[in-house]
Amino acid sequence: MSQHVISNVIHKSDLNDKKDNERLLKLEHELSIVKVELEAEKRRVQDKQETIDSLKTALKLLEYRQDKSVTIEPPKEDTASEPQKNGSSVDNSSNTGLLGRLKKLFS
């Protein structure tokens, strides 16, 4: 009878080891998936940072160019709603327009 009990204990131990092994393999697989996802997220963050840096550089170049260019007088109030001859409007205010919005975004 003692051999039967010992055999059952060994058999249960083998089953527990097998379950533990399966669980370990599953956890290792999940860990490898998480590592791949983490690397993908790191790359996305790096790409976004590069985009932000590029936009900051473009903004600085635009500001430098605007500072070096001749100041354009704003149109008179009665013609303010009319577009300029080249079809674009120039706004020297630092709070409006594309440059103003970019300054707010990156300051």
Image (tube, helix red, strand yellow):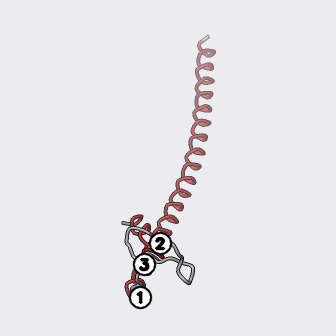
Tag 2's secondary structure? helix
- Is 49 above or below relative to 63? above
Instruction: Please indicate whether residue 54 sits to the left or right of residue 104 in the image.
Output: right
Residue highlighted by disc 2: 55
Q: Are marks 1 and 3 in contact (CB under 8 Å)?
A: no
Image point (44%, 77%), residue name? 57
Give residue 91's position: percent from left, percent from top: 43, 75
Give residue 26's position: percent from left, percent from top: 60, 40
| Mark 3 residue crowding within 10 angstroms, few (<14) / some (14–19) / many (20+) | few
- Mark 2 vs mark 1, CA separation in Å: 21 Å
Q: 11 or 27, which lies in front?
A: 27
Sequence-first tag of 1 and 3:
1
- Mark 1 vs mark 3, CA separation in Å: 21 Å
Please state which amino acid type lies under the numbered disc 3.
Answer: Lys
Residue highlighted by disc 1: 69
| Mark 2 residue crowding within 10 angstroms, few (<14) / some (14–19) / many (20+) | some
